[in-house]
Image: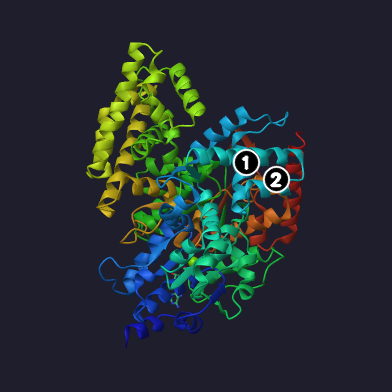
Amino acid sequence: MTRSGQLLAELNPAQRQAVEILSGPLLVLAGAGTGKTRVVTYRMANLICHGVPPERILAVTFTRKAAGEMLSRLRGLVRLRGNKRPLVGTFHALCLEVLRRHAACLGYPRGFAIYDRGDQLGVIRSVLREVATGGVSFRPADLAAMFSTWKARGLWPHQAAAQAHDDRTHVAALLYRRYQQALRLAGAMDFDDLLLVTERLFEEHPQVLQEEAARFDHILVDEYQDTNPPQYRIIRRLARPHGNFCAVGDDDQSIYSWRGAEVEHILRFRRDWPQARIIRLEENYRSTQPILDMANRVIAFNLARHPKKLRSARGPGPKPRVVAYEDEEEEARATVAQILAAVRSRQARPGDHAVLFRTNDQLRPFEAELRRLGLAYTVVGSTSFFDRKEVRDLLAYLKLLQRPEDDVALLRVINTPGRGIGQQTVESLLARAVEQNRPVWQVLQDSSWRQGLSARVQQALDGFVQLVQQLRRQARGRRGVAGLLEHLLESVDYQREIQRLSKTQEEALQRQKSVQGLLETAAAFDRQEPRGSLRQFLDQVAVADRGFATAEGERFDPDQVVLITLHGAKGLEFPRVFLVGMEEGLLPHRHALAEGDRAIDEERRLCYVGITRAQDVLVLSYCRHRLRRGRRKPTVPSRFLYEAAGQAEMARQVAQLAGQAAAEQRLGR
Ligand code: ATP
Ligand code: MG
C-alpha cells in the first residue's frame, strides 16, 4: 500500500473524505472526540505525501501544548526531512512573527516590547493618575478587562467610544485611548495588540499581506468555533489568495465568547467560502458510551444549538461517578488517593490522570496533596510562574539588555537590587524623559541632567549604565540565554536581593526555586534553538502557552499527573478524568450567575468540554463546604450534576436558588 493509502486506512469514511480533499475550502463540523484534530493532522500528512512542501503548510491550534501534540503525531505519520516542517502554533505566535518582520511599517520599533499583565496594569495606573475621570472610579484590573474585551472584538478606542452607551463606558473608552497612546509611546504592544495590530497591518499595507499570504499554500485551523473577530479576519485574509482553507470545530465547545469568540464564524462559513465542502463526523472514538450519555444529557439543556448526539465507537464502560466531599481538603485527599491507588496497582500511569477545575484558586489543595504523597504533576497553562516578583525582575533585566529603550523594564530594575538610586532621582529622571520625549536610557547618559546630583548618586548611576553595557556585550556574544542569565545573576548579586526580600528561609528557598525555573526555561530554549537570540527567547516567554510547537513537538510526560483548567483542557483527552468543584458559583461560575442565561449556556458548554475529555473513567465531585475569602461556607451542588442525571426539575430549582443568591449579592444583602 502507498503511504497515502496507509494513512487513509486509519480513518472512517467521512474522515477519509475530508483528508482526500486536497484543495479548496473545507469545513469539518462535528462533536467532541469524533476525530476533527485527527483529520487536521492526517490531512497535513496526506498533503505532504502528495508533494506539498511541509513548510508551506500552516496549522493554527489553540495552545502551544496542542501544537506540540499535533506536530509530534504528524512526525509519527510522515518522515519530515531536514528541518522542513509545517508551522504549527497559535494565532498569537503567528502574529508576533509577522509583526517582528513588519511592525516598522506602522511606526513601531523593530524590537517592540510585549507588555504582560503586570506591565499593563502599571500603564493603566499611570493613565489613571493623569486623566481626570470626573468622579467615576475604576479598578485597574477592571479597566484591563474592558480594554481586552474591546480588543478581542477588534475595536479600537474611537470605535469603543462610538459604542459606549453610558458615562462609565465613555470614560473607560477615553482611558483606552490614553492607554493605547502610552503603549505607542513606549514602543510596546500588549497581548491583544498582537492580533489587532496585525489586522491593521494587513489592512493598511496590502503588499505585506500579499507577502505573508504567499508563504503558505494550505491553512488549517483547529477549534475554529473559538476564533475572535480579529483572528477570523486575519486568517481569512491569509487564506483568500489560494482558498485552501480547512477549518474544524464544534459549536457545542465554544467557550471563549468572553474573549470575543464568535460561533457565528463557523456558521457563516458557507457564505465566506461559497465553494466550501462541509463534512460532518458522527462517531466518537474517545469515550465509552456511558460517558457520552452523560455529555449528551447535559448539553441538551442548551436550547440554541444544532442538535447532535455523540455515539461511541468504543461501546460500554463503567458509569461516571458523582461524589460529595466535606470540603476542598477532603476532595483533594480523596482524589489524589484514587490516583495513587491506580498507579500503585499498575492500572494506570500518573499521566493517565487529569484533574480539571474551573478556576486557578482550586489548585492549591491538590498541589499540596500531590507533593505530600510524592506524585509528580504538571500544572498546564498556569502563568503564575511568570508573575512572581523574582522572575519578573530577571525578565525585566533581559528585556533591558535586548532593548535599553524599554522604559518599563529599565525603571523596574534601576534600583533592584538596591544600588543607591533613590526614588527622587528616578522621578527627576522620568520627568526629564517625558519633557524631552526621549527614552530614559538616553537621559541617563546625558551629563546635563546629572549636574545637580551628588557624587554618590552619580557614581551609582554610572555603575548601572556600565553594568547594562557590559551585559549587553555579553548578550551579543551568543553564549546562550542560560549563560547570560547566570552571568546576570552574579553581576547584580541577585542572591542578596532574594535574602532581602524573604522573611523566612522557606520563602527564600521558594524564590530560589523560581529563579532556577527560569534558568531551566532558558536552558531548554538554548537546546531547542541553538542559534536562537535573546529576543526570540523573550518572545517565547511573552506568548508562553500561546507559542509555536518546537521542532520535535512535545507531548505530556506519562509520569506526571495533569492539573488543568477546563479552558486549557479543550482538545485534549485523558483515560481518567476528575472533574472537581462541581458547585454553583464555581461551575457555573459566579460571574455567569450574575450575567444570565447566555453566560450559563457557556458554562454548560465548558462542563460538556470537561466531561468529553474522559476516555474510560470519569469522576465528578463537589464539596459541601468551601473556603471563600477565608470563611468556610456551605455550597450548593451544581445544576449540571442534576442535568447530567436527567433530573431537569431539580436542576431548575437549583438554578432558581442560585440566581436569587446572585441577585441578592449584587444588591449587597
Ligand atoms: P475534540 O472536539 O475534543 O477536539 P476531536 O474531534 O478533535 O475532539 P480527536 O482528538 O481528533 O477528536 O480524536 C479523539 C480520539 O479518537 C483520538 O484519540 C483519536 O486518535 C481517536 N480517533 C479518531 N478517529 C479515529 C479512527 N478513525 N480510528 C481510531 N481512532 C480514532
Ligand atoms: Mg480536537
Q: Which mark is residue 229?
A: none
* Residue 354 x/y as whole percent: 45, 55
The N terminus sits in image quarter: bottom left
Farthest residue toward the bottom? 1
- Residue 97 lies in what quarter of the image? bottom left
* Residue 214 x/y as whole percent: 43, 69
Foreground: 488 or 326? Answer: 488
Label 1 SS: helix
Q: Residue at horizontal 52%, vertical 41%?
A: 184
At label 1, the amino acid type is: Tyr
At label 2, the amino acid type is: Ala
Q: Is residue 635 above or below residue 4?
A: above
Q: How is the image coloured?
A: rainbow
* Label 1 packing within 10 angstroms: few (<14), some (14-19), many (20+): many
Foreground: 444 or 416? Answer: 444
Q: In this view, does 578 lie above or below 508?
A: below
Q: Is residue 305 above or below residue 419?
A: below
* Residue 142 x/y as whole percent: 63, 38
Query: What is the CA distance from the residue labelled 1 to the residue labelled 2?
Result: 9 Å
Residue linked to disc 2: 161
Residue 528 appears in view: yes
Foreground: 191 or 375? Answer: 191
Residue linked to disc 1: 176
* Label 2 packing within 10 angstroms: few (<14), some (14-19), many (20+): some
Label 2 SS: helix
Q: Residue at horizontal 65%, vertical 49%?
A: 637
* Residue 241 x/y as whole percent: 50, 73
Residue 317 appears in view: no
Marks 1 and 2: CB-CB under 8 Å?
yes
Foreground: 190 or 580? Answer: 190
- Numbered circles on residues, count: 2
